[in-house]
């Protein structure tokens, strides 16, 4: 596969800052005839270089589908995705992708799982090993290099997954509900860790979530999608300083934003009425 953007081979300088990701008229339909399902309808927005964008909406609204289209893993029914102005026509191998499940190989150690990126991309092993250990330190899992996935907690496994996604220093990171399977306390810590990782590298991040507080804490902008077919209801500029803390959720501004986003989704039929 050919990447959309050439990968820098020097990991010490690669991926500084981010790239733009533009969605132009993206619509997508699964199936045919009576089994046809409209997943997305006329999605238009641009993630600016180095911006953290949350895709927020109810389950089944096409958030994950939008990520796979942007990654070149699925071809949209209509519309175009451009990365730094270049149309995505095949899998975009330059990005990092973090899924809801860590998807680690159980027979490989934490460090060995991270190093899979280096093996797949033929990156210099010594250079990749140095970066892998730096990432493990940054995410708080130093000392667990030789631990196997079964010996790690859910949060630690997801940290390994994030390190693996960042090993090649990609200019953009796609995260598909990466904390959905974690307990509340671990989730809070992962939110704070992810914010710090983003602040350190300022990569372009597209982050799928259905959790309003999570989106507010992490994102520069929140793209709110309505229930299927997913279409943009509104784009919110979160604003405010960085880093944000969990306590910020109780401030007047964040309370009002949470209420406004929740009300928007409720009026669009995203929540069941009782």
Image (tube, rainbow, N blue to C red):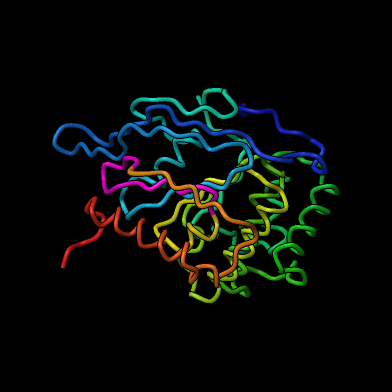
Residue 97 included in the magenta stretch of the image: no
Residue at 79% across, 35% down: 9
Estimate the x, y position of residue 210 in percent, counting from the top left: 39, 58
Out of 59 and 74, give the one closest to the viewer: 59
Q: In this picture, which residue range is highlighted in magenta?
A: 219-232
Estimate the x, y position of residue 29 in percent, counting from the top left: 28, 34
Location of the N terminus by quadrant is top right
**Residue 3 lies in what quarter of the image?**
top right
Residue at 23% across, 39% down: 37
Q: Is residue 150 above or below residue 220?
A: below
Residue at 58% across, 33% down: 20
Estimate the x, y position of residue 137 in percent, counting from the top left: 77, 64
Out of 262 and 24, give the one closest to the viewer: 262
Out of 125 and 243, give the one closest to the viewer: 243
Residue 230 included in the magenta stretch of the image: yes
Location of the C terminus by quadrant is bottom left
Residue situated furthest left in the rendering: 34
**Residue 78 lies in what quarter of the image?**
top left
Residue at 17% across, 63% down: 273
Out of 177 and 125, give the one closest to the viewer: 177
Residue situated furthest front in the rendering: 252
Q: In this view, does 185 lie to the left or right of 138?
A: left
């Amino acid at each position: 596969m050919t990447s959309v953007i050439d990968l820098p081979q020097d990991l010490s300088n690669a991926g500084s800052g981010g790239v733009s990701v533009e969605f132009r008229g993206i619509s997508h339909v699964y199936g045919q005839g009576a089994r046809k399902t409209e997943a997305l309808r006329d999605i238009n927005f641009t993630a600016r270089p180095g911006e953290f964008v949350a895709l927020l909406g109810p389950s089944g609204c096409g958030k994950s589908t939008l990520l796979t289209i942007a990654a070149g893993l699925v071809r949209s029914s209509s519309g175009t995705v451009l990365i730094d102005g270049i149309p995505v026509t095949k899998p975009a191998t330059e990005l990092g992708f973090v899924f809801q499940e860590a998807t680690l190989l159980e027979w490989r150690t934490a460090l060995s799982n991270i190093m899979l990126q280096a093996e797949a991309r033929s990156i210099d092993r010594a250079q990749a090993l140095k970066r892998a250990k730096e990432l493990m330190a940054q995410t708080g899992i130093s000392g667990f290099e030789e631990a196997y996935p079964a010996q790690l907690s859910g949060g630690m496994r997801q940290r390994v997954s994030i390190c693996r996604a960042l090993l090649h220093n990609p200019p953009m990171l796609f995260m598909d509900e990466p904390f959905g399977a974690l307990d509340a306390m671990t989730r809070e810590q992962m939110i704070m860790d992810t914010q710090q990782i983003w602040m350190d590298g300022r990569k372009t991040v597209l982050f799928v979530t259905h959790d309003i507080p999570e989106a507010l804490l992490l994102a520069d902008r929140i793209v709110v999608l309505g229930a299927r077919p997913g279409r943009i209801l509104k784009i919110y500029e979160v604003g405010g300083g960085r880093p944000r803390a969990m306590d910020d959720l109780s401030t007047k501004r964040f309370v009002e934003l949470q209420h406004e986003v929740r009300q928007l989704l409720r009026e669009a039929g995203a929540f069941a009425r009782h």
